[in-house]
Amino acid sequence: MDSILQTDFKLSDIEVSDVQDIGRYIEVPANQNGPLYRTMFPQLNTVTEVQKEQITRWYIEMLEDAVQAREERFLKVCSMNGTPVGFCGERARKRSWLPDTLDVDSWAALSKDLKAERDRILQDLDHFCRLTFMAVHPKYQRQGIGSMMMQHICKETDQKGQCAYVLAAPEGVPLYSKFGFKTVGHVETTYGTITSMFRPSRPSCT
């Protein structure tokens, strides 16, 4: 249950100066138990601090490249003191270097399966929002921040007449369902199910 009013937080565009904190304190901690992350880094529990830092740096640089490109919109939610506590966005850019602990073969195989599922749903569409990032700092989860971001995203897509699509980790499925996303497929992994979810375009009320 959402225990904090959304007025306790502020939604705004991500700036490049936000990326370090977002990558280090939100994206990596929020996603490290999900099926995609665990497939990519199956030895996560035994990696050294230096290796963990390398993984974090890789994520930060991918996000930094995407934000700098300004090709897609990225949003952050900050607490009243200005600290980022959540973020969302559409697409990432892959880095030319890879962390030493990345299981490249497993990552490539899962990426292929995810792309096939995504293409199956979106192949005949040319006007859609593909949500790639959605993460909330573990300390601030279940306090309405995810709903705050989804309300904004759904309002914006409705205004544009867009449908929306996401490949959801298990913990994200209830949130997306709450905002009208329907399950249209699944991709199974050793570490859990990634759910393919689609929200049709809707007439805007504004």
Image (spheres, rainbow, N blue to C red):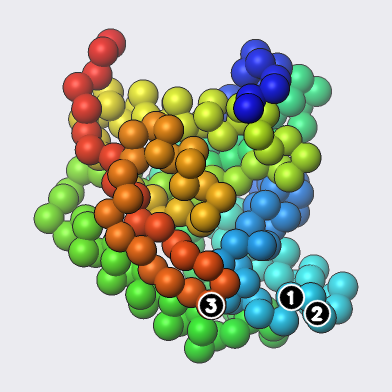
- Tag 2 near tag 1, CB within 8 Å: yes
Give residue 182's mark.
none
Say if 150 sits above or below 3 in the image: below
CA separation in Å, label 1 and label 3: 14 Å
Q: Which residue is mark 3?
A: 190
CA separation in Å, label 2 and label 1: 5 Å
Give residue 44's mark.
1
Q: Which residue is mark 2?
A: 47
Label whose residue precedes the other's in the sequence (1 or 3): 1
In percent of width and height, residue 193 lies at: 47, 65
Please state, as top left, top right, bottom left or bottom right, where the C terminus lies in the image. top left
Residue at far left of view: 124
Label whose residue precedes the other's in the sequence (3 or 2): 2
Residue at the (80%, 23%) spot, across then down? 81
Observer-nearest of 72 and 204: 204
Observer-nearest of 161 and 73: 161
In percent of width and height, residue 76 lies at: 60, 35
In percent of width and height, residue 12 lies at: 57, 27
Please state, as top left, top right, bottom left or bottom right, where the N terminus lies in the image. top right
SS of the residue at dot 2? loop
Is residue 66 something that shows in the picture?
no
Say if 85 sits above or below 173 in the image: above
Determine which quarter of the picture holds residue 9: top right
Is residue 189 something that shows in the picture?
yes
Residue at far bottom of view: 105
In percent of width and height, residue 32 lies at: 67, 62
Q: Residues within 10 Å of mark 2 (few under 14, many from 20)?
A: few
157 left or right, relative to 144: left
